[in-house]
């Protein structure tokens, strides 16, 4: 075989190897997929919009895609590899805390408190946790670390989790009926991106922007029935800046159609009740903001600060964490396919040429 032919065959094999690698490279097997958001109550809706965030019920996603792995375990040992913000009886060193990141907040145990806040002076407030294995007092252990929020350097966040940034939440209320005094609760969150040395910051809200003070707990709690006892009347079911977290949703087949009434009954035609109060060992929701992702990817910010509050806790044991996700797989680009065809064509041509010689 001539040297030219041998080199050309080697080049063709290189094309084959490269094309195969491009098409067959696996995604991370352990990460759940963040679906393309389609928020609302349409036939294909998979989330609800809460101001700046898309909120996905994992119970609904599991109905819509049973093979999607949305039945996510959330016991302390199972979320230990991830970046934990708060955990029932959480230790400050829990979770993957490599780099510049706050430790884990301890969320209330069963029936020990009716509210929780990362703002130390608020009802249910918990002091800023120490950096894992750090010698500091909790706050000001790294640039951007403040007392009243869970903080992480943006470079650390991207190193541990990448983007999209997805927050997971486990829901563990007790009781046999719907309502804030039973299995439902209120939640609110604020994520702020800041730049070292001051300058413009950017804030994203899970819920509304408080009209008084810095958080909803600066004001009296809303009554347990809001301004309207009909849970399905979202226009009049007002809880101010709080997000009302229901222990169940109503579905027709795989379509989300609304929430149960105050008796916990789905009244939308032939709709059925699906439990979302899955306990502290199973993830109930995942939350994502494409706008937050874009701001993080812009490179214009250095620290992310998370403020988190809950009210009408009845049972306790809620946890929140950040974990890597995958995104929907795209159709293979034409380039790898063309490269594969080129490699096969070159190999066949050189084989014929070699036979003639």
Image (spheres, rainbow, N blue to C red):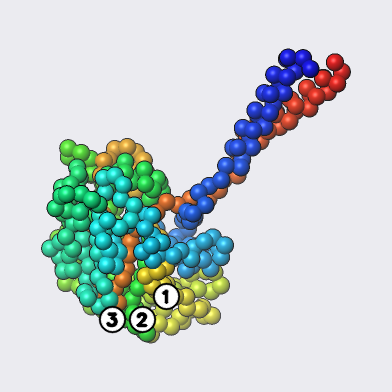
Q: Which residue shows up at 56% across the image and 72% down it?
A: 253
In this orientation, does residue 222 appear?
Answer: no
Above or below, 69 against 342 in this view is: below
Q: Which residue shows up at 83% across the image and 23% down it?
A: 352
* Residue 73, image x, y percentages: 44, 65
> Sequence order check: which comes first, mark 1 or mark 2?
2
Under circle 3, the secondary element is loop
Q: Which mark is residue 248?
A: 1
* Residue 187, image x, y percentages: 29, 66
Residue carrying label 3: 181
Q: Which mark is residue 178?
A: 2
Question: Which quarter of the figure is the C terminus placed in?
Answer: top right
- Relative to 122, is 256 on the left or the right? right
Tell which of 312 and 133 is nearer to you.
133
* Residue 283, image x, y percentages: 41, 65
Residue 43 image-quadrant placement:
bottom right
- Relative to 13, is 83 on the left or the right? left
């Amino acid at each position: 075989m001539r040297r030219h032919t041998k080199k050309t065959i080697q080049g063709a094999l290189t094309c084959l190897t490269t094309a195969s690698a491009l098409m067959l490279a696996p995604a991370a097997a352990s990460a759940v997929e963040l679906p393309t958001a389609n928020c609302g109550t349409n036939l294909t809706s998979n989330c609800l919009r809460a101001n700046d965030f898309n909120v996905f019920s994992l119970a609904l996603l599991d109905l819509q895609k049973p093979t999607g792995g949305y039945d996510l375990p959330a016991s302390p040992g199972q979320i230990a590899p991830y970046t934990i913000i708060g955990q029932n009886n959480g230790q400050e060193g829990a979770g993957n805390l490599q780099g510049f990141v706050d430790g884990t907040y301890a969320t209330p145990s069963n029936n020990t408190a009716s509210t929780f806040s990362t703002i130390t002076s608020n009802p249910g407030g918990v002091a800023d946790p120490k950096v894992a294995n750090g010698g500091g007092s909790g706050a000001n252990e790294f640039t951007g670390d403040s007392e009243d929020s869970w903080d992480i350097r943006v470079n650390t966040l991207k190193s541990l989790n990448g983007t999209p940034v997805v927050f997971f939440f486990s829901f563990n209320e007790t009781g046999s009926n719907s309502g804030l005094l039973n299995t439902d609760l209120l939640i609110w969150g604020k994520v702020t991106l800041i730049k070292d040395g001051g300058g413009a910051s950017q804030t994203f809200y899970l819920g509304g922007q408080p009209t008084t003070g810095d958080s909803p707990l600066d004001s009296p709690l809303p009554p347990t029935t809001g301004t309207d006892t009909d849970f399905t009347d979202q226009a009049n079911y007002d809880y101010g800046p709080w997000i009302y977290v229901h222990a169940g949703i109503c579905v027709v087949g795989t379509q989300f159609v609304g929430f149960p009434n105050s008796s916990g009954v789905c009244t939308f035609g032939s709709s059925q009740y699906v439990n979302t109060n899955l306990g502290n060992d199973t993830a109930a929701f995942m939350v994502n903001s494409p706008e937050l992702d874009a701001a993080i990817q812009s490179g214009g910010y250095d620290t992310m600060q998370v403020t988190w509050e809950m009210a009408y806790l009845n049972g306790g044991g809620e946890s929140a964490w950040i974990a890597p996700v995958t995104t929907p797989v795209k159709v293979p680009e034409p380039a790898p396919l063309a490269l594969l065809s080129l490699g096969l064509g070159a190999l066949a041509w050189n084989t014929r040429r070699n036979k003639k010689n």
